[in-house]
Image (cartoon, rainbow, N blue to C red):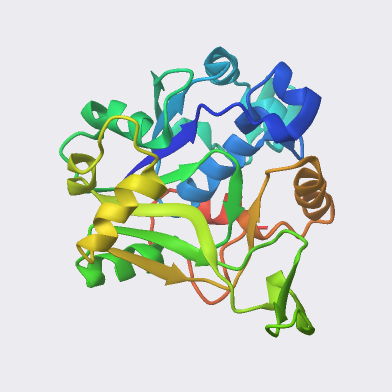
Amino acid sequence: MKVVIFCGGFGVRMGEETRRIPKPMIEIGGKPILWHIMRYYSMWGHDEFILCLGYKGEVVKQFFLSYNGALLNDFVLDRGATGTTLELLSRDLDKWRITFVDTGLNATIGERLKAVEPFLGEDDSFLATYGDGLTDAPLTNVIQAFDDSGKKAMFLLVRPQFNAHMVTTDPQGNVLTVEALARSDVRINGGFFVMKREVLELIEPGDELVEETFARLIAERQLVAYPYDGFFGMMDTIKDRQRLESLHESGQAPWRSFPLDSPPPALPPGDTRAEAFTG
């Protein structure tokens, strides 16, 4: 399935860094978060990407135009008697087909999705996400649940990760409970979507996908959610980035490995992504 990634926002909450680069190009472990997102999808066998560019889209293009796999991946350098050879231990970009589309500086998410419709080909369904979130959700299971639902759209339903407390009071304002939001029953849209092409027919000019377009899907009872309590992390703030960076440095970045209870899909003979990407 093709993967649409929304990369055009300004990312103002990330501070000074987004004055020179777009938020999807902010690095985690020395690589843009956009690279990590694409790698996650590729782990599950989805290698065709459509990037919806906007703010500083030329920075995204330049990264891939000048991509050097040896600088961003492990490799073996052999200066033997027959000459110098370099063997990459993982070849992520070799399998990726990337379409870069300028979808406008101030376009809404709905408008960006509508703008890339011609590049979706004849596929009945597609995947989509934002350029600033990571998960280890078992993508094959998510897609299967979507197919089984018969609905037009699905999103990952996750626990909020930001620090806040949910408070309940009585009519007099006396506090009854104070509960960490991340441990409550509250769930939010995780921003990882599976959709059918029919969704594009519901997008009107100016639509924010999750607000106006999804409201139409809800009215038709065509929107479902996939509950997931595993890892989910958005990079909305500098503190969020520090958390993701810390996980990466510790060697415990969940988005880099297949969930233990959800093995990777069967890949063609000779395709070593499962081994190269795990760990």
Camera-nearest residue between 261 and 158: 158
Residue depicted at 79% across the width and 40% down the height: 238
In the picture, the quarter occupied by the C terminus is: bottom right
Q: Quadrant of residue 237?
A: top right
User: Is residue 268 at least partly visible in the picture?
Assistant: no
Residue depicted at 43% across the width and 29% down the height: 51
Measured along the vertical axis of the image, is residue 126 above or below residue 102?
below
Q: Quadrant of residue 174?
A: bottom right
Query: Residue 277 appears at what percent x and percent y?
Result: 59, 51
Camera-nearest residue between 64 and 92: 64
Camera-nearest residue between 228 and 174: 174
Residue depicted at 41% across the width and 35% down the height: 109
Camera-nearest residue between 270 and 243: 243
Q: How many marks?
A: 0
Q: Residue furthest front?
A: 172
* Residue 72 in the figure: left or right of residue 62: right
Measured along the vertical axis of the image, is residue 110 above or below residue 215?
above
* Residue 201 in the figure: left or right of residue 69: left
Query: Residue 104 appears at what percent x and percent y?
Result: 42, 18
Measured along the vertical axis of the image, is residue 258 above or below residue 24?
below
* Residue 138 in the figure: left or right of residue 234: left
Residue depicted at 76% across the width and 48% down the height: 240
Query: Residue 201 appears at what percent x and percent y?
Result: 17, 41
Q: Quadrant of residue 39?
A: top right
Query: Residue 106 appears at what percent x and percent y?
Result: 47, 21
User: Is residue 238 at least partly visible in the picture?
Assistant: yes
Measured along the vertical axis of the image, is residue 174 above or below residue 140?
below
* Residue 36 in the figure: left or right of residue 130: right
